[in-house]
Image: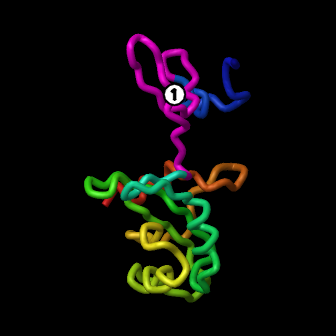
Amino acid sequence: MFLEYWRRPEVTREAFRDGWFRTGDTAVLEDAAYRILGRSSVDIIKTGGFKVSALEIEEELRTHPAIAECAVVGIEDPDWGERICTAVELAPGAELSIEELQRWARERLAPYKIPRTLCSVAALPRNAMGKVLKPEVTKLFRTG
């Protein structure tokens, strides 16, 4: 495939394990053969038996007047598989509670797509190109 990411040793270290490139595909070993189950993705959340698009939820949440920018992630949950969590950059002077967000979202999203946890941040973690770093967003919900 390829040897490394050009001039990005830290990204190369994260992308390879024991000399193998990690594609993000999920597979199981059955009867001495690998069966590919699909691609694991931070943008697909599996909650309560549903596959939910984080991008779809983000698109809707961005229409909330208090939200300037947001990122939706799934955090492991013993009852639901994953819990839908959202980190938001608020519009200047805005405030937003999880209860208010959920009340607003009930009119626009299916019940299983409504965020269960909210974290307000001054700025979402981004890479040099400006893309939100979802693995870093998930850490916001695991630390506490």
Which residue bears the numbered disc 1?
Answer: 36
Q: Is residue 138 magenta?
A: no
Image quarter in which the C terminus is found: bottom left
> Which kind of residue does numbered mark 1 sit on?
Ile
Residue 5: image location, x then y, percent: 69, 28
Of residues 117 and 131, the one nearer the viewer is 117
Relative to 17, residue 82 above or below: below
**Quarter residue 8 falls in:** top right
Of residues 55 and 109, the one nearer the viewer is 109
Where does the magenta region start and end? 17-43
Q: Please give the name of the residue rendered at 55% of the width and 37% of the height, measured from the top-left corner.
A: 39
Relative to 69, residue 24 above or below: above
- Quick check: can you spot residue 119? no
Q: Please give the name of the residue rendered at 39% of the width and 54% of the height, measured from the top-left corner.
A: 49
Residue 105: image location, x then y, percent: 50, 80
Of residues 107 and 118, the one nearer the viewer is 107
Q: Please give the name of the residue rendered at 38% of the width and 60% of the height, measured from the top-left corner.
A: 83
Q: Secondary structure at mark 1?
A: strand
**Quarter residue 70 falls in:** bottom right
The residue furthest top is 32
Of residues 125 and 1, the one nearer the viewer is 1
Instruction: Estimate how packed mark 1 is, as few (under 14), some (14 to 19) or many (20 or more) residues with alpha carbons within 10 Å.
Output: few
Residue 9: image location, x then y, percent: 62, 28
The residue furthest left is 78
Relative to 22, residue 91 above or below: below
**Would residue 48 be found to the left or right of residue 7 on screen?**
left
Image quarter in which the N terminus is found: top right
Residue 46: image location, x then y, percent: 43, 52
**Structure colour scheme:** rainbow
- Quick check: can you spot residue 24? yes
Q: Please give the name of the residue rendered at 55% of the width and 87% of the height, measured from the top-left corner.
A: 94
